[in-house]
Amino acid sequence: MPRALITGITGQDGQYLAEFLHGRGYDVFGVVPGQANPRADALQEEMPFVEVLGADLQDLSSLIAAVEYSQPDEVYNLGAISFVPLSFRQPELTANVTGLGVLRMLEAIRVVGGRDNPIRFYQASSSEMFGKVRESPQNESTPFYPRSPYGVAKVFGHQITVNYREAYGLYAVSGILFNHESPRRGLEFVTRKITNSVARIKVEIQEELVLGNLEARRDWGYAEDYVRAMWMMLQQAEPDDYVIATGESHSVEEFVERAFTAAGIDDWRRFVRVDPRFLRPSDVDTLIGDPSKARRVLGWEPTVSFDDLVRLMVERDLGAERERLRSLAR
Ligand code: NDP
Ligand code: GDR
C-alpha cells in the first residue's frame, strides 16, 4: 500500500484529499496541530481510516517525528494560515506557519529521507502570489506580486520548494491553485459566507448579508477537482509546477446574484450591505488562470462549472439549515 502524509488534513482540501487517497488504496496519515484540536475529533469520526499525528508546522522536531513514523511515499503540505485577512492581523504567525513551515517540512523530508530520497513532496502554492497581476491570464511563468502577508509567505514557500528540488534533487512540486470551493469551505471565505447566509435568509433566520469588496474577481473551481490535480502532479516522471484553474473569472457580486437566484430569491440587493470593515488594506482585484499546461501534461480538466458550483453550495447549505430547523422542532 502506498503511504501519504498530509498536513492541513482538517481543512477543506485535506479532507477531500484524504478521501481521494483512501479510495486509491493509500494508508493516510494526517498532521494535526494543538493538544485538544476539536477538528481532529470531527475528522476521526468522519474518517476513521486516517491515522492522526500530533505535529505543528512551527516545530521541526514534530515534523521529523511525523515523517519518521509514517514513512510516507508522498507528503502533501496543505497546512497554513490560509485566511488572507488574518494574515494582515497576524503577519508574523503567517510568515512562520505558511512560509517557514514549508522549509521545515522540506527539511524533515531531506533529513529523514536521506541521500536517495524517494519521498515525493507537494506544496500548496496559491494564485495569491500573482496578486497585482502582471499579465492575464496567469500561467506558470507569470511574475509574482503578492498583496498580503499571506501572499508573501506563499511566495517564500513556492521558491524554497523550487530551491530544494534544484539543490538537493528532491522530488518536490508546487501546485499554483486558484480559488476552489465546496460545501466544506470555511465560513470565513467569501463563497461559503454567501451560500450559508443565503440559506439562512431563505429560511428566515438571518436578515442581511454583509460583505466587503463586491468587485473583486476570482477564478473559482470545485475543490474535489483540485485535490485530484495535486495527486496527478506527484505521479509524473519529473517534478514540475502547474497552474490549476478553470480559465474563467467572475466577480463577488456575480457569485452573490447567482446564489440568491439558486435559492429562488430575485431581489438580492434588498439583503446585501457593504461594510468597509470587510475591506482589506490591499486586495487582489482580479485573477484568471491559464491551466493549459496541466491540461496538456497531466490530462487534468475541471468538471464543475461556476453555475453548478454556486448551486451545489447553496443547495447543501439550504439542506443543512432546513435539517437543523426540523431537528429543533422535534
Ligand atoms: P483551510 O484553511 O481549510 O485549512 C488549513 C489547514 O492548515 C487546517 O487543517 C489547519 O489546522 C492547518 N494548520 C493551520 N496552522 C497549522 C500549523 N501551525 N501546523 C499544522 N497545520 C496547521 O485551507 P484549504 O484546505 O482551503 O487550503 C489548503 C492549502 O492550500 C492551504 O495551504 C492554502 O493556503 C492553500 N490554497 C488554498 C486555496 C483554496 O482556494 N482553498 C487556493 C490555493 C492555495 P486546524 O484548523 O485544525 O488548526
Ligand atoms: P481569497 O478568498 O482572499 O481569494 O483567498 P476569500 O474568499 O477570502 O476572498 C475573495 C475575495 O472576496 C472579497 N470579499 C470578501 N472576502 C471575505 N472573506 N469576506 C467578505 O465578507 C468579503 N467581501 C468581499 C475579498 O476582498 C477577496 O477579494 C482564498 C484562500 O483560500 C487562500 O488561502 C487561497 O490561497 C486563495 O483563495 C487562492
Image (cartoon, rainbow, N blue to C red):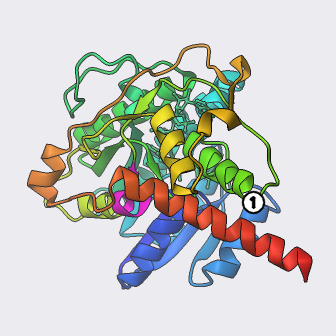
Vertical comparison of 91 with 167: above or below: above
Res. 144 in view: yes
Residue nearest the observer in this picture, 147 or 330 = 330
Q: Looking at the figure, which quarter contains the N terminus?
A: bottom left
Residue 225: x and y in percent read 34, 61
Residue 173: x and y in percent read 29, 48
Please identify the quarter of the rendering in which residue 177 is found. top left
Q: Looking at the figure, which quarter contains the C terminus?
A: bottom right
- The residue that appears at 37% across and 65% down in the rendered structure is 74
Q: Which structural element holds mark 1?
A: loop
Residue 76: x and y in percent read 43, 58
Res. 60 in view: no
Q: Amino acid at mark 1?
A: Val
Residue on which disc 1 sits: 203
Write the start and end of the magenta stretch as one range. 221-227
Please identify the quarter of the rendering in which residue 245 is found. top left
Residue 146: x and y in percent read 43, 20
Does the residue tagged 1 have its C-beta within 8 Å of any atom of ligand 2?
A: no
Q: Magenta region, mostly helix, strand or loop?
A: helix
- For label 1, the crowd category at 10 Å Cα-Cα, with few meaning under 14, some 14 to 19 and many 20 or more, is some
Please count the marks in the image.
1
Q: In screen coordinates, is 242 left or right of 88? A: left
- The residue that appears at 60% across and 51% down in the rendered structure is 195
- The residue that appears at 20% across and 38% down in the rendered structure is 290
Q: In screen coordinates, is 34 left or right of 46? A: right
Vertical comparison of 141 with 58: above or below: above
Q: Residue furthest front?
A: 266
Vertical comparison of 83 with 8: above or below: above
Vertical comparison of 308 with 141: above or below: below
Inspect the magenta stretch and tell me whether residue 226 lies in it.
Answer: yes
